[in-house]
Amino acid sequence: MPDFASLWLTESDAPTGTALRRARRRLALAVAIGDLAGLIDLTAVTGALTDFADFALDTAIRAAIAERTPGAPPIGFAAIALGKQGSHELNYSSDIDPILIFDPATLPVRPREAPEEAAVRIGRRVIELLQARDADGYVLRVDLRLRPSAEITPIVLPIDAAISHYESAALAWERAAFIRARAAAGDIALGDRFLAAIKPFVWRRALDFGAIGEIRAISKRIRDHHAQGQALGPGYDLKRGRGGIREVEFFAQIHQLIHGGRDLAVRVPATRDALAALAAHGWIDADDAAALSAAYTLYRTIEHRAQMVEDRQTHALPAGAALESLAALHGLPDGAALLALLAPHVAHTERVYAALEPDAAPGLSQDPATLAVMLQEAGFGGDTVDRAIERIAQWRAGAYPALRSGAARAALEAVLPGLVRALGQAADPAEAVLRLDRILAKLSSAINFFRLLEAQPALAALLTAILSHAPPLADTLGRRPELFDALLDASALDPVGDVAALAAQMMPRERDADYQAVLDQARRVVGEHRFALGVQIVAHAADPLAVAASYARVAEAAIGVIARATIAEFASAHGRVPGSELVILALGRLGGGVLTHASDLDLIYVFTGDYAAESDGARPLGAVLYYNRLAQRLTAALSVPTPAGPLYDIDTRLRPSGTQGPLVVSMTGFARYQREAAWTWEHMALARARSLFGSAAAQAEAQVVIDDVLGGARPQRDLAADAEKMRADIAAHKPPAGPLDVKLLPGGLVDLEFTVHLTQLAARTGFDPNLGGAIDALVTAGLLAPGLRAAHDLLTRLLVITRLVAPDGAVPGEATRALIVAAMGVSDWAALVALIDATRQDVRDSWKQAIERYRDGPD
């Protein structure tokens, strides 16, 4: 690529404005020759023109400051490039659209001069240097109308006032403008600070489909205002016409606004780069992206040809002989060939962009009789019609705070037709309406919730499934409606990543984030993943066993992130205990790596090193007190609900001596207790123990203790008698909640767990924290019946499903039964019931056989 920057060098004896104007003429000529000769492509053309614009703007700012305050550093004044300058896509005759900001604390000023006055004077001088015309032409046209409230604000804004505007009063179109923003000239550090501060305004995790609708409205106004340039032919407006440049740009920006809050990879300013990134990450069709990129390249190239003639700021195809000349500049025989070249690109772009507009749905009637007919046609029947009419009337009347604004009710009306159609297909439309009503009653604002459903109609069906079948998810959605936004992610219905990847998501992006920020980020990510994983079950998007493993990885990542943050926070006051560290052991379902939506976490805390040691901080504590206070804080961080949401219920009753013992014991004390004093039920629990947190050496030390105890270094007991009594006690004190409580029913998961753990302890083999893995090992050893692995998988799948759709253990309605049947992969409910009964009988038989085999025998 040619070194165009050498053409910018200004004559040292010429005034700044004159030197820049001459430099601009040299550059424009060189770029035009390279363009027409085919030596440089569109990216090189726009890049060279943009680089010069940055240089000229920066030179003008430096000159303006130097003229007023000689010798002062050029700081405290910055230009934020928007539009095509911001994305390095300037054309031959583009305006630049900067926002000028200043820092009153650092801007050079004259004696007794207010910074605000100095900033405006510097800004005026910058514009004069760039826009003034003489025999050498001009440097750049400058348009400052994109600044906040341009009709009443000064041309240069103090940084704090600008930030305040974008945080509180900015319009929707301004978000799209800042997709392509960058600090281009002047005090770059100041500009970057401003852009970092307003980043949450631009890239929102909670989607605002009102902003997207506003972009569509802008597009419609452009079409209406420039009506004569809409159809392809002489006079066609390459920029504003249907299927033209602006629609390619808006298509990319709309998708960036939708997905950029969560996917950093699509936060790229240049249009073609944005299309490529969106396609690469699955947000838009790859063929559409390629076609739009090709169209954009052609449009911009032809636009440049038109602007080369007399430096005209035009985007329209000329007529007559001028069209023939333009075609010749592009190497085509005539104007008809040029129009033929453009035609398929215009048609495809218009078609792709038009597809963003959802089909208009008929409004939902206000008349009760007509509304009743519409509800019946949607699938409501019987008295559910009257109840639905009553609820809809309450919503329309603003029964809840979230529905009292005119904007909220307008958003409700827009989404009601599609929502009613979806609710009418629910298993129980009346119950679905009631659950939606409970969500609306808890919302602080319903506008964005409705706009989300309007912009993504397919989500209405998914929402209906949640409302109809999954009370825990519906309740969660009522507390945190923004969770529904996450379902727009392409990966929302995929298995979550590994523990390391999840932990990275749970850490705030800011390196200096405080402890509370870490907790809030972890809670937010956990909430999102748990909700999405529950939806996977309702949507039949994943095997419930895979979802259960994903639940466990989410919990493990959260424990690691929050433990590290809590330890660091605690150490800031109390230091650390030399040669010692905290180790966290997981037991139960978490130890086995399989959780349900409702699982609590069974944890044991131990610490390594000398229990008599003392921490080395400003407020030292003895090791035992240190780790017990630390564990109390960690347990609270993992379990106490906050505005960011709850995490988990933590159960530490499996620790040595249970609730009568300290929360944390030393590794030595833990080993001694397990080897000398622990009961059979504690050793059964230990069979599913797994280290989740601590250094590799500390976790290995804990594993040695676990392996030693399970291998036989424990008191000799009548294992079968102990296990039989414990199972009877559970049956007496915690009976099954209902006919689908496959955990506590005879022959359910508890019986299967007791069978496995009794066999493991008695035979001293087959130890694996994962219950399925342990069954496989015991089956291989000939100690369990081969069919027990299938029993484990069936009962576990059913438990994971019913914790969401039948948490009370009762047999649900017909439609929810159909959902369970589909998730279990069987033909019908009768077949599932028969399979459950047969499985439970197999488990009961295995449990009885294990008791008989090891009764009165040594372990």
Image (tube, rainbow, N blue to C red):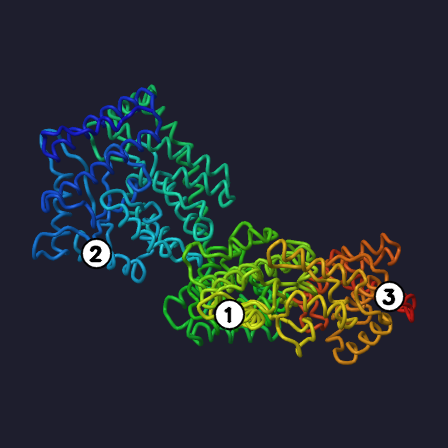
Residue occupied by mark 2? 158
Residue occupied by mark 1? 479
Report whether 460 appears left or right of 724.
left
Q: Give the residue type that dot 2 points to.
A: Pro
Residue occupied by mark 3? 859
Q: Secondary structure at mark 1?
A: helix
Please tell me in which quadrant of the rendered image residue 252 appears.
Answer: top left
Real-space Cα separation, disc 3 to disc 1, in angstroms: 51 Å
Q: In front of the other: label 3 or label 1?
A: 3
Residue 74 percent location from the top left of the image: 18, 45
Q: In front of the other: label 2 or label 3?
A: 3
Q: Secondary structure at mark 3?
A: loop
The crowding category of the residue bearing disc 1, from other C-alpha atoms within 10 Å (few below 14, some 14 to 19, many at least 20), is some
Marks 2,3: beta carbons within 8 A: no
Q: Nearer the viewer, residue 531 or 601?
A: 601
Q: Nearer the viewer, residue 456 or 189?
A: 189
Q: Residue at the spot x=41%, y=33% of the render?
A: 345
Query: Of the numbered discs in the image, which one, if any, rests on residue 769?
Result: none
Residue 766, relative to residue 642: is it above or below?
Answer: above
Q: Nearer the viewer, residue 67 or 82?
A: 67
The crowding category of the residue bearing disc 3, from other C-alpha atoms within 10 Å (few below 14, some 14 to 19, many at least 20), is many
Report whether 379 appears left or right of 509.
right
* Res 373 seen here: no
Q: Residue at the spot x=43%, y=50% of the render?
A: 260
Mark positioned earlier in the residue sequence (1 or 2):
2
Q: Give the residue type that dot 3 points to.
A: Asp
Q: Secondary structure at mark 2?
A: strand
